[in-house]
Image: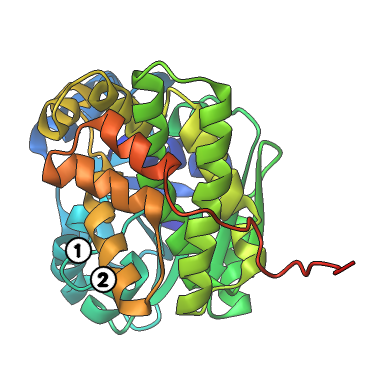
Amino acid sequence: MADISIIGAGSWGTALAVLLHKNGHKITVWSIVESEIEMLNKEREHKDKLPGVKLPDDMVFTTDLEAAVTGRDVLVLAVPSPYTRSTSHSMKPFVKEGQIIVDVAKGIEEKTLMTLSQIIEEEIPQAEVAVLSGPSHAEEVGRGIPTTIVVAASKKSTAEYLQNIFMNEVFRVYITPDVLGVELGAALKNVVALAAGIADGLGYGDNTKAALITRGIAEIARLGLAMGGRIETFSGLTGIGDLIVTCASMHSRNRRAGILIGKGYTMEQAMDEVKMVVEGVYSAKAAMGLAEKYHVQLPIIEQVNAVLFDGMPVDEAVKNLMLRDKKIENPLIPWEEA
């Protein structure tokens, strides 16, 4: 049995707390929001973000960050990506040398263009940082619906340790050393999912969705390879797998926000309506910063940025994508000249 704290009591953090408790581990859940902790202690259910999933009586809920962090075997960092740096900074004094932190949020920091694991390593250099990602809606994991996911870590021993902690009969865990590729797939698929939602909001169909998914993963892989990620990662669970589920499911807050934007809502109105952090909005500008830095074209992500931040009408963004210069789908496939 491991002693584990979940730092962040949103839907994903709560779902993972339930999963890890079922695996026999001792679980503490921390939130900075006092009213949230009071509700969890009283109701034993996150009625706002994970309704219907009962929380065990021996699961501890607290606002005391020092108590939640100190002496734990594993820390699962589950705060929304915009709060990764500030939360990591607050955790630093209580993290022991070599303590394992598993980041389960998805995003890229706009100002620095750093991935979330890079932020954690900068703020808490004494920690051993890993990433857990893949096609995994909290609403389904909390209900025990079969799910497959990936743990990425620089050390194989760390990845295998976490694989044993998280894996059970309904939660299959693979491992990989490609931390960067996993994080890029996780962050950028949220931006493409906004595009997929916008298409849904405009009333487009399956043809459009398929185009966005396949050309979207091409963009993600193009940037990922330029940055040093592995092509195998982008064709796997944390690449095409996570992109499919995020573009297709109504559990996806990014797709839901995109649908509202496609129907005429502003970005701010859509985020208010979804009532959860829409991480694709925060990653969109960062993605364009990375595209410029690594000299990579990201046409779908570029048009999403134009809609979100430049006031471009959504139908004009679609037209811009459809009327781009003619291309070969895969330039690496040679022609056999007659």
Residue 162 visible in image: yes
What amino acid is at disc 1? Glu
Q: Position of residue 84 (x, y in %)?
A: 23, 60
Residue displayed at 18% across by 34% down: 37
Left or right, 34 with respect to 106, comes to: left
Left or right, 190 with respect to 244, comes to: left
Q: Position of residue 65 (x, y in %)?
A: 17, 57
Q: CA distance from mark 1 to mark 2?
A: 5 Å
Q: Secondary structure at mark 1?
A: loop
The image shows residue 309, relative to residue 319, as above or below, that is below
In the picture, the disc for residue 110 is 1
Front one among 123 and 211:
211
> How dense is the environment of label 2, judged by Cα within 10 Å: few (below 14), some, or many (20 and up)?
some
Left or right, 338 with respect to 78, comes to: right
The image shows residue 177, relative to residue 169, as above or below, that is below
Residue 134 visible in image: no
Residue displayed at 42% across by 43% down: 323
In the picture, the disc for residue 113 is 2
What amino acid is at disc 2? Leu
> How dense is the environment of label 1, judged by Cα within 10 Å: few (below 14), some, or many (20 and up)?
some
Q: Are marks 1 and 2 in contact (CB under 8 Å)?
A: yes
Q: Position of residue 240 (x, y in %)?
A: 59, 49
Front one among 33 and 109:
109
Q: Quadrant of the C terminus?
A: bottom right
Q: Quadrant of residue 322?
A: top left
Q: Quadrant of the N terminus?
A: bottom right
Residue displayed at 53% across by 73% down: 225
Q: Position of residue 337 (x, y in %)?
A: 85, 69
Q: Quadrant of residue 262?
A: top left
